[in-house]
Amino acid sequence: MDFVTGLRCRECSRTYPAEALHVCDYCFGPLEVAYDYDAMAVTVTRERIESGPQSIWRYADLLPVTDTAPIDLRTGFTPLVRADRLAAELGLGELWIKNDTVNPTGSFKDRVVSVALTRARELGFKVAACASTGNLANSVAAHAARAGMTSVVFIPKDLELAKVVTTAVYGGYLIAVDGTYDDVNRLCAELASEHPTWAFVNVNLRTYYAEGSKTLAFEVAEQLGWQAPDHVVVPVASGSQLTKIHKGFGELHRVGLLHDEPHVRVSGAQAAGCSPVATAFADGSDAIRPVRPKTIAKSLAIGNPADGWYALETVRQSGGSFAAASDEEILEGIRLLARTEGIFAETAGGVTIACLAKLATSGVVRPDELVVAYVTGNGLKTVEALAGTTGPTATIAPTIEAFASAVEVEGGSHTT
Ligand SMILES: *Cc1c(COP(=O)(O)O)cnc(C)c1O
Ligand SMILES: [Zn+2]
Protein backbone atom coordinates (compact mmCIF):
# COMPACT_ATOMS: atom_id res chain seq x y z
CA MET A 1 0.00 0.00 0.00
CA ASP A 2 2.98 2.24 0.58
CA PHE A 3 3.35 2.26 -3.18
CA VAL A 4 -0.30 2.64 -4.20
CA THR A 5 -0.92 6.02 -5.81
CA GLY A 6 -4.66 5.48 -6.34
CA LEU A 7 -6.98 3.84 -8.84
CA ARG A 8 -6.85 4.44 -12.58
CA CYS A 9 -9.39 3.81 -15.34
CA ARG A 10 -8.13 1.20 -17.79
CA GLU A 11 -9.85 2.99 -20.66
CA CYS A 12 -9.46 6.76 -20.16
CA SER A 13 -6.73 6.81 -17.46
CA ARG A 14 -8.65 9.15 -15.14
CA THR A 15 -7.50 8.69 -11.55
CA TYR A 16 -9.46 8.05 -8.36
CA PRO A 17 -8.61 7.66 -4.68
CA ALA A 18 -7.93 4.12 -3.38
CA GLU A 19 -11.46 3.53 -2.09
CA ALA A 20 -14.18 0.95 -2.80
CA LEU A 21 -14.62 2.05 -6.41
CA HIS A 22 -14.62 -0.19 -9.45
CA VAL A 23 -15.95 1.71 -12.48
CA CYS A 24 -15.01 5.01 -14.01
CA ASP A 25 -17.67 7.74 -13.61
CA TYR A 26 -16.83 9.16 -17.04
CA CYS A 27 -16.51 6.21 -19.38
CA PHE A 28 -17.70 3.22 -17.27
CA GLY A 29 -14.33 1.52 -17.84
CA PRO A 30 -12.98 -0.75 -15.08
CA LEU A 31 -10.61 0.74 -12.53
CA GLU A 32 -7.23 -0.72 -11.71
CA VAL A 33 -4.82 -0.13 -8.83
CA ALA A 34 -1.96 2.22 -9.78
CA TYR A 35 1.47 1.98 -8.13
CA ASP A 36 4.63 4.04 -7.98
CA TYR A 37 6.95 1.40 -9.45
CA ASP A 38 10.06 3.55 -9.18
CA ALA A 39 9.61 3.85 -5.42
CA MET A 40 8.72 0.15 -5.22
CA ALA A 41 11.91 -0.78 -7.08
CA VAL A 42 14.04 0.99 -4.46
CA THR A 43 12.51 -0.89 -1.51
CA VAL A 44 11.58 -4.32 -2.86
CA THR A 45 14.39 -6.84 -3.23
CA ARG A 46 14.53 -10.60 -3.74
CA GLU A 47 16.02 -10.97 -0.26
CA ARG A 48 13.21 -8.96 1.33
CA ILE A 49 10.63 -11.20 -0.32
CA GLU A 50 12.51 -14.44 0.41
CA SER A 51 12.64 -13.59 4.12
CA GLY A 52 8.87 -13.04 4.24
CA PRO A 53 6.11 -15.48 5.27
CA GLN A 54 5.45 -18.68 3.27
CA SER A 55 2.24 -17.20 1.86
CA ILE A 56 1.03 -14.60 -0.62
CA TRP A 57 1.89 -12.01 2.01
CA ARG A 58 5.61 -12.26 1.21
CA TYR A 59 4.60 -10.01 -1.73
CA ALA A 60 2.74 -7.46 0.45
CA ASP A 61 4.77 -4.59 -1.05
CA LEU A 62 3.24 -5.36 -4.46
CA LEU A 63 -0.33 -5.64 -3.14
CA PRO A 64 -2.87 -2.87 -2.39
CA VAL A 65 -3.06 -3.21 1.42
CA THR A 66 -1.39 -1.54 4.41
CA ASP A 67 -2.40 -3.87 7.25
CA THR A 68 0.64 -5.78 8.50
CA ALA A 69 -1.71 -8.39 10.02
CA PRO A 70 -3.83 -9.32 6.97
CA ILE A 71 -6.83 -11.68 7.02
CA ASP A 72 -4.87 -14.81 6.31
CA LEU A 73 -5.55 -18.54 6.42
CA ARG A 74 -2.01 -19.11 5.10
CA THR A 75 -2.87 -18.82 1.45
CA GLY A 76 -0.40 -19.24 -1.35
CA PHE A 77 3.23 -20.20 -1.82
CA THR A 78 1.72 -23.42 -3.12
CA PRO A 79 3.94 -26.07 -4.75
CA LEU A 80 5.27 -25.65 -8.26
CA VAL A 81 5.89 -29.26 -9.26
CA ARG A 82 7.91 -30.55 -12.18
CA ALA A 83 5.58 -32.79 -14.19
CA ASP A 84 7.85 -35.09 -16.21
CA ARG A 85 5.41 -37.98 -16.47
CA LEU A 86 2.63 -35.73 -17.75
CA ALA A 87 5.09 -33.97 -20.08
CA ALA A 88 6.10 -37.33 -21.57
CA GLU A 89 2.45 -38.23 -22.25
CA LEU A 90 1.87 -34.88 -23.95
CA GLY A 91 5.14 -34.80 -25.89
CA LEU A 92 6.34 -31.73 -24.02
CA GLY A 93 9.70 -30.84 -22.47
CA GLU A 94 9.97 -28.82 -19.25
CA LEU A 95 6.46 -28.77 -17.80
CA TRP A 96 5.46 -27.56 -14.34
CA ILE A 97 2.14 -27.64 -12.52
CA LYS A 98 1.26 -24.77 -10.21
CA ASN A 99 -0.71 -26.77 -7.67
CA ASP A 100 -3.27 -24.36 -6.23
CA THR A 101 -5.50 -27.24 -5.11
CA VAL A 102 -3.81 -27.07 -1.70
CA ASN A 103 -4.90 -23.58 -0.67
CA PRO A 104 -6.84 -23.36 2.63
CA THR A 105 -10.30 -23.66 1.04
CA GLY A 106 -9.05 -25.68 -1.91
CA SER A 107 -8.82 -23.13 -4.71
CA PHE A 108 -6.90 -20.11 -5.96
CA LYS A 109 -9.81 -17.90 -4.82
CA ASP A 110 -8.16 -17.69 -1.38
CA ARG A 111 -5.58 -15.38 -2.99
CA VAL A 112 -8.08 -12.83 -4.24
CA VAL A 113 -10.29 -13.01 -1.16
CA SER A 114 -7.45 -12.58 1.33
CA VAL A 115 -6.44 -9.38 -0.48
CA ALA A 116 -9.98 -8.05 -1.06
CA LEU A 117 -11.23 -8.59 2.49
CA THR A 118 -8.07 -7.25 4.09
CA ARG A 119 -8.53 -4.07 2.05
CA ALA A 120 -12.27 -4.07 2.86
CA ARG A 121 -11.53 -4.21 6.58
CA GLU A 122 -9.05 -1.33 6.21
CA LEU A 123 -11.79 0.70 4.52
CA GLY A 124 -14.14 0.00 7.46
CA PHE A 125 -16.44 -2.66 5.98
CA LYS A 126 -17.96 -5.19 8.38
CA VAL A 127 -20.00 -7.28 5.94
CA ALA A 128 -18.34 -9.44 3.26
CA ALA A 129 -20.44 -10.46 0.26
CA CYS A 130 -20.02 -12.03 -3.17
CA ALA A 131 -21.61 -13.65 -6.19
CA SER A 132 -19.95 -17.00 -6.72
CA THR A 133 -19.71 -20.06 -8.95
CA GLY A 134 -18.70 -21.95 -5.77
CA ASN A 135 -15.04 -21.49 -4.93
CA LEU A 136 -15.36 -17.81 -4.15
CA ALA A 137 -18.26 -18.67 -1.83
CA ASN A 138 -16.07 -21.11 0.16
CA SER A 139 -13.28 -18.61 0.45
CA VAL A 140 -15.35 -15.54 1.37
CA ALA A 141 -17.24 -17.48 4.06
CA ALA A 142 -13.99 -18.83 5.54
CA HIS A 143 -12.06 -15.55 5.51
CA ALA A 144 -15.05 -13.63 6.92
CA ALA A 145 -15.25 -16.17 9.75
CA ARG A 146 -11.54 -15.74 10.45
CA ALA A 147 -11.91 -11.95 10.54
CA GLY A 148 -15.13 -11.92 12.57
CA MET A 149 -17.01 -10.31 9.68
CA THR A 150 -20.54 -11.23 8.61
CA SER A 151 -20.70 -12.98 5.23
CA VAL A 152 -23.54 -12.89 2.72
CA VAL A 153 -22.83 -15.24 -0.16
CA PHE A 154 -24.92 -15.72 -3.31
CA ILE A 155 -24.63 -18.86 -5.48
CA PRO A 156 -26.60 -20.50 -8.30
CA LYS A 157 -28.76 -23.17 -6.64
CA ASP A 158 -27.41 -26.09 -8.75
CA LEU A 159 -23.85 -26.12 -7.34
CA GLU A 160 -21.95 -29.25 -6.30
CA LEU A 161 -22.81 -30.51 -2.78
CA ALA A 162 -19.25 -30.08 -1.48
CA LYS A 163 -19.19 -26.41 -2.46
CA VAL A 164 -22.50 -25.76 -0.71
CA VAL A 165 -21.51 -27.59 2.49
CA THR A 166 -18.02 -26.08 2.68
CA THR A 167 -19.51 -22.62 2.43
CA ALA A 168 -22.39 -23.09 4.85
CA VAL A 169 -20.19 -24.62 7.55
CA TYR A 170 -18.52 -21.26 8.26
CA GLY A 171 -21.79 -19.89 9.58
CA GLY A 172 -22.55 -16.93 7.33
CA TYR A 173 -25.62 -16.29 5.20
CA LEU A 174 -25.69 -18.49 2.09
CA ILE A 175 -28.32 -17.61 -0.50
CA ALA A 176 -29.02 -20.10 -3.31
CA VAL A 177 -30.52 -18.32 -6.31
CA ASP A 178 -32.77 -19.92 -8.91
CA GLY A 179 -30.71 -18.88 -11.94
CA THR A 180 -27.30 -19.00 -13.59
CA TYR A 181 -24.15 -17.34 -12.25
CA ASP A 182 -24.82 -14.43 -14.58
CA ASP A 183 -28.24 -13.96 -12.95
CA VAL A 184 -26.62 -14.11 -9.51
CA ASN A 185 -23.99 -11.60 -10.56
CA ARG A 186 -26.57 -9.16 -11.91
CA LEU A 187 -28.53 -9.45 -8.65
CA CYS A 188 -25.36 -8.70 -6.68
CA ALA A 189 -24.59 -5.65 -8.82
CA GLU A 190 -28.05 -4.33 -7.87
CA LEU A 191 -27.61 -5.27 -4.22
CA ALA A 192 -24.22 -3.58 -4.12
CA SER A 193 -25.84 -0.23 -4.90
CA GLU A 194 -28.61 -0.89 -2.33
CA HIS A 195 -26.07 -1.83 0.36
CA PRO A 196 -23.02 0.41 -0.09
CA THR A 197 -21.75 -0.65 3.35
CA TRP A 198 -21.27 -4.25 2.18
CA ALA A 199 -17.98 -5.31 0.68
CA PHE A 200 -18.87 -7.33 -2.42
CA VAL A 201 -15.44 -8.75 -3.15
CA ASN A 202 -16.10 -9.15 -6.88
CA VAL A 203 -18.19 -5.98 -7.34
CA ASN A 204 -17.25 -2.84 -5.39
CA LEU A 205 -13.98 -4.41 -4.11
CA ARG A 206 -13.13 -5.97 -7.47
CA THR A 207 -10.21 -3.63 -8.10
CA TYR A 208 -8.41 -5.02 -5.02
CA TYR A 209 -9.69 -8.59 -5.48
CA ALA A 210 -8.17 -8.81 -8.95
CA GLU A 211 -4.71 -7.85 -7.68
CA GLY A 212 -4.56 -11.03 -5.59
CA SER A 213 -4.17 -13.11 -8.77
CA LYS A 214 -0.81 -11.46 -9.47
CA THR A 215 0.65 -13.66 -6.73
CA LEU A 216 0.20 -16.64 -9.11
CA ALA A 217 2.86 -15.05 -11.30
CA PHE A 218 5.06 -13.83 -8.43
CA GLU A 219 5.30 -17.29 -6.89
CA VAL A 220 6.01 -19.09 -10.16
CA ALA A 221 8.80 -16.64 -11.03
CA GLU A 222 10.36 -16.93 -7.58
CA GLN A 223 10.03 -20.73 -7.60
CA LEU A 224 11.77 -20.86 -10.99
CA GLY A 225 14.70 -18.90 -9.55
CA TRP A 226 13.43 -15.42 -10.47
CA GLN A 227 12.70 -16.11 -14.09
CA ALA A 228 9.42 -16.13 -15.99
CA PRO A 229 8.22 -19.20 -17.92
CA ASP A 230 7.95 -19.17 -21.71
CA HIS A 231 4.32 -20.20 -21.81
CA VAL A 232 1.51 -20.41 -19.25
CA VAL A 233 -1.87 -22.11 -19.59
CA VAL A 234 -4.57 -20.49 -17.47
CA PRO A 235 -8.27 -21.35 -16.95
CA VAL A 236 -10.69 -18.55 -17.81
CA ALA A 237 -14.01 -17.71 -16.14
CA SER A 238 -14.29 -13.91 -15.82
CA GLY A 239 -10.81 -13.58 -17.35
CA SER A 240 -9.42 -11.66 -14.39
CA GLN A 241 -6.91 -14.30 -13.29
CA LEU A 242 -5.36 -14.66 -16.74
CA THR A 243 -4.99 -10.92 -17.18
CA LYS A 244 -3.39 -10.48 -13.76
CA ILE A 245 -0.95 -13.36 -14.14
CA HIS A 246 0.41 -11.61 -17.21
CA LYS A 247 0.52 -8.29 -15.36
CA GLY A 248 2.33 -9.94 -12.43
CA PHE A 249 5.30 -11.06 -14.53
CA GLY A 250 5.51 -7.58 -16.02
CA GLU A 251 5.54 -5.94 -12.58
CA LEU A 252 8.33 -8.17 -11.30
CA HIS A 253 10.43 -7.13 -14.27
CA ARG A 254 9.54 -3.49 -13.84
CA VAL A 255 10.81 -3.42 -10.26
CA GLY A 256 13.98 -5.27 -11.24
CA LEU A 257 13.38 -8.69 -9.65
CA LEU A 258 13.72 -10.92 -12.74
CA HIS A 259 17.04 -11.96 -14.24
CA ASP A 260 15.76 -11.48 -17.80
CA GLU A 261 13.00 -9.57 -19.52
CA PRO A 262 9.91 -11.84 -19.57
CA HIS A 263 8.29 -12.90 -22.84
CA VAL A 264 5.48 -15.04 -21.50
CA ARG A 265 3.03 -16.47 -23.98
CA VAL A 266 -0.34 -16.72 -22.26
CA SER A 267 -2.92 -19.29 -23.41
CA GLY A 268 -6.46 -19.55 -22.08
CA ALA A 269 -8.46 -22.68 -21.23
CA GLN A 270 -12.26 -22.81 -21.26
CA ALA A 271 -14.94 -25.47 -21.15
CA ALA A 272 -16.58 -26.00 -24.54
CA GLY A 273 -19.95 -25.62 -22.81
CA CYS A 274 -19.01 -22.08 -21.76
CA SER A 275 -16.37 -20.69 -24.07
CA PRO A 276 -17.28 -17.11 -25.00
CA VAL A 277 -13.66 -15.92 -24.96
CA ALA A 278 -12.18 -18.95 -26.74
CA THR A 279 -14.89 -18.60 -29.38
CA ALA A 280 -14.13 -14.90 -29.96
CA PHE A 281 -10.45 -15.84 -30.30
CA ALA A 282 -11.23 -18.59 -32.82
CA ASP A 283 -13.46 -16.23 -34.80
CA GLY A 284 -10.86 -13.46 -34.77
CA SER A 285 -13.57 -11.26 -33.27
CA ASP A 286 -13.33 -8.42 -30.74
CA ALA A 287 -16.88 -8.94 -29.56
CA ILE A 288 -17.43 -11.51 -26.84
CA ARG A 289 -20.90 -12.87 -27.31
CA PRO A 290 -22.50 -13.99 -23.98
CA VAL A 291 -23.53 -17.65 -23.75
CA ARG A 292 -25.75 -19.72 -21.48
CA PRO A 293 -23.32 -22.13 -19.75
CA LYS A 294 -23.75 -25.88 -19.97
CA THR A 295 -20.69 -27.64 -18.56
CA ILE A 296 -19.52 -29.74 -15.63
CA ALA A 297 -16.83 -27.08 -15.02
CA LYS A 298 -19.20 -25.01 -12.89
CA SER A 299 -16.44 -22.90 -11.36
CA LEU A 300 -15.70 -21.57 -14.86
CA ALA A 301 -19.34 -21.19 -15.91
CA ILE A 302 -19.49 -17.45 -16.53
CA GLY A 303 -21.39 -16.77 -19.74
CA ASN A 304 -20.76 -13.02 -19.77
CA PRO A 305 -17.19 -12.56 -18.52
CA ALA A 306 -16.38 -9.15 -17.03
CA ASP A 307 -12.72 -9.21 -18.08
CA GLY A 308 -13.19 -11.33 -21.18
CA TRP A 309 -12.05 -8.67 -23.61
CA TYR A 310 -8.88 -7.95 -21.61
CA ALA A 311 -8.12 -11.67 -21.43
CA LEU A 312 -8.57 -11.93 -25.20
CA GLU A 313 -6.21 -8.98 -25.76
CA THR A 314 -3.62 -10.40 -23.37
CA VAL A 315 -3.62 -13.76 -25.15
CA ARG A 316 -3.40 -12.17 -28.60
CA GLN A 317 -0.64 -9.73 -27.73
CA SER A 318 1.44 -12.36 -25.94
CA GLY A 319 1.31 -14.78 -28.87
CA GLY A 320 -0.74 -17.36 -27.02
CA SER A 321 -3.93 -19.11 -28.00
CA PHE A 322 -7.17 -20.54 -26.61
CA ALA A 323 -8.59 -24.03 -26.39
CA ALA A 324 -11.93 -25.39 -25.21
CA ALA A 325 -12.59 -28.83 -23.69
CA SER A 326 -15.75 -30.93 -23.79
CA ASP A 327 -17.11 -32.52 -20.61
CA GLU A 328 -15.61 -35.87 -21.64
CA GLU A 329 -12.22 -34.25 -22.26
CA ILE A 330 -12.41 -32.47 -18.89
CA LEU A 331 -12.90 -35.81 -17.10
CA GLU A 332 -10.01 -37.30 -19.07
CA GLY A 333 -7.89 -34.29 -18.08
CA ILE A 334 -8.66 -34.88 -14.40
CA ARG A 335 -7.74 -38.57 -14.71
CA LEU A 336 -4.58 -37.87 -16.71
CA LEU A 337 -3.23 -35.41 -14.13
CA ALA A 338 -4.15 -37.73 -11.27
CA ARG A 339 -2.55 -40.84 -12.75
CA THR A 340 0.63 -39.15 -14.00
CA GLU A 341 1.37 -36.69 -11.19
CA GLY A 342 -0.73 -37.66 -8.17
CA ILE A 343 -2.69 -34.41 -8.17
CA PHE A 344 -6.48 -34.53 -7.95
CA ALA A 345 -8.00 -31.43 -9.50
CA GLU A 346 -11.57 -30.24 -9.75
CA THR A 347 -13.24 -29.83 -13.13
CA ALA A 348 -11.51 -26.46 -13.75
CA GLY A 349 -8.16 -28.27 -13.45
CA GLY A 350 -9.46 -30.84 -15.90
CA VAL A 351 -10.14 -27.97 -18.29
CA THR A 352 -6.56 -26.70 -17.93
CA ILE A 353 -5.01 -30.13 -18.55
CA ALA A 354 -7.34 -31.01 -21.42
CA CYS A 355 -6.62 -27.67 -23.10
CA LEU A 356 -2.89 -28.05 -22.47
CA ALA A 357 -3.09 -31.43 -24.24
CA LYS A 358 -4.91 -29.87 -27.19
CA LEU A 359 -2.47 -26.98 -27.45
CA ALA A 360 0.45 -29.44 -27.31
CA THR A 361 -1.09 -31.55 -30.08
CA SER A 362 -1.66 -28.53 -32.30
CA GLY A 363 1.91 -27.33 -31.70
CA VAL A 364 0.92 -24.07 -29.99
CA VAL A 365 2.58 -25.20 -26.74
CA ARG A 366 6.00 -26.45 -27.80
CA PRO A 367 8.47 -28.99 -26.36
CA ASP A 368 11.25 -26.37 -26.34
CA GLU A 369 9.28 -24.09 -24.02
CA LEU A 370 9.31 -23.90 -20.23
CA VAL A 371 5.58 -24.36 -19.62
CA VAL A 372 3.53 -23.76 -16.48
CA ALA A 373 -0.07 -25.01 -16.24
CA TYR A 374 -2.23 -23.49 -13.51
CA VAL A 375 -4.33 -26.08 -11.67
CA THR A 376 -6.60 -23.92 -9.57
CA GLY A 377 -9.06 -26.07 -7.62
CA ASN A 378 -9.23 -29.30 -5.58
CA GLY A 379 -10.88 -32.47 -6.88
CA LEU A 380 -12.68 -33.13 -3.59
CA LYS A 381 -14.96 -30.22 -4.46
CA THR A 382 -16.40 -31.88 -7.56
CA VAL A 383 -16.32 -35.64 -6.92
CA GLU A 384 -19.77 -36.04 -8.48
CA ALA A 385 -18.25 -35.21 -11.86
CA LEU A 386 -16.37 -38.53 -11.71
CA ALA A 387 -18.97 -40.58 -9.85
CA GLY A 388 -20.17 -43.47 -11.99
CA THR A 389 -17.04 -43.36 -14.16
CA THR A 390 -14.48 -44.04 -11.43
CA GLY A 391 -14.64 -46.64 -8.67
CA PRO A 392 -13.24 -49.95 -7.43
CA THR A 393 -11.40 -52.17 -9.92
CA ALA A 394 -13.41 -55.09 -8.56
CA THR A 395 -15.72 -55.92 -5.67
CA ILE A 396 -14.87 -59.35 -4.25
CA ALA A 397 -15.52 -61.83 -1.46
CA PRO A 398 -12.80 -61.68 1.26
CA THR A 399 -10.81 -64.67 -0.05
CA ILE A 400 -7.48 -65.13 -1.87
CA GLU A 401 -9.25 -67.08 -4.62
CA ALA A 402 -11.75 -64.33 -5.26
CA PHE A 403 -8.95 -61.78 -5.52
CA ALA A 404 -6.88 -64.04 -7.79
CA SER A 405 -9.72 -64.57 -10.20
CA ALA A 406 -10.79 -60.93 -10.21
CA VAL A 407 -7.57 -59.07 -11.04
CA GLU A 408 -4.09 -59.47 -12.38
CA VAL A 409 -1.87 -56.67 -11.08
CA GLU A 410 0.48 -55.32 -13.74
CA GLY A 411 4.10 -55.41 -12.59
CA GLY A 412 2.89 -57.28 -9.54
CA SER A 413 4.87 -60.54 -9.83
CA HIS A 414 8.08 -60.57 -7.83
CA THR A 415 10.20 -63.33 -9.30
CA THR A 416 13.87 -62.69 -8.71
C1 LIG B 1 -12.85 -18.62 -10.40
C2 LIG B 1 -11.97 -19.71 -10.87
C3 LIG B 1 -11.15 -19.59 -12.00
C4 LIG B 1 -11.17 -18.41 -12.96
O1 LIG B 1 -11.07 -17.17 -12.46
P1 LIG B 1 -11.39 -15.83 -13.27
O2 LIG B 1 -10.45 -14.85 -12.67
O3 LIG B 1 -12.82 -15.49 -12.99
O4 LIG B 1 -11.15 -16.06 -14.73
C5 LIG B 1 -10.30 -20.63 -12.30
N1 LIG B 1 -10.25 -21.74 -11.57
C6 LIG B 1 -11.04 -21.92 -10.49
C7 LIG B 1 -10.93 -23.20 -9.74
C8 LIG B 1 -11.91 -20.91 -10.10
O5 LIG B 1 -12.68 -21.09 -9.02
ZN1 LIG C 1 -12.65 6.07 -17.73
Image (tube, rainbow, N blue to C red):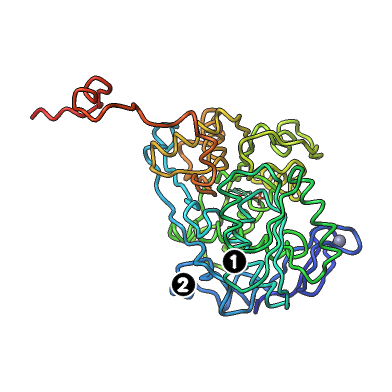
| Residue 148 at x, y percent in the picture | 62, 74
Left or right of residue 330, residue 88 in this image: left
Name the foreground residue: 4 vs 355: 355
What amino acid does circle 1 point to? His
Name the foreground residue: 405 vs 344: 405
Quadrant housing the N terminus:
bottom right
Task: For ligand 1, tell me if the residue under mark 2 lies within 8 Å.
Answer: no
Residue at the image point whose x is 69% and y is 61% from the top: 173
Q: Which quadrant holds residue 66?
A: bottom right
Label 1: state its secondary structure.
helix
Label located before the other in sequence (2 or 1): 2
Left or right of residue 83, residue 247 in this image: right
Residue at the image point whose x is 63% and y is 55% from the top: 136
| Residue 11 at x, y percent in the picture | 83, 57
Q: List the residue tagged with mark 1.
A: 143
Residue at the image point whose x is 68% and y is 69% from the top: 150
Q: List the residue tagged with mark 2.
A: 53
| Residue 409 at x, y percent in the picture | 25, 27
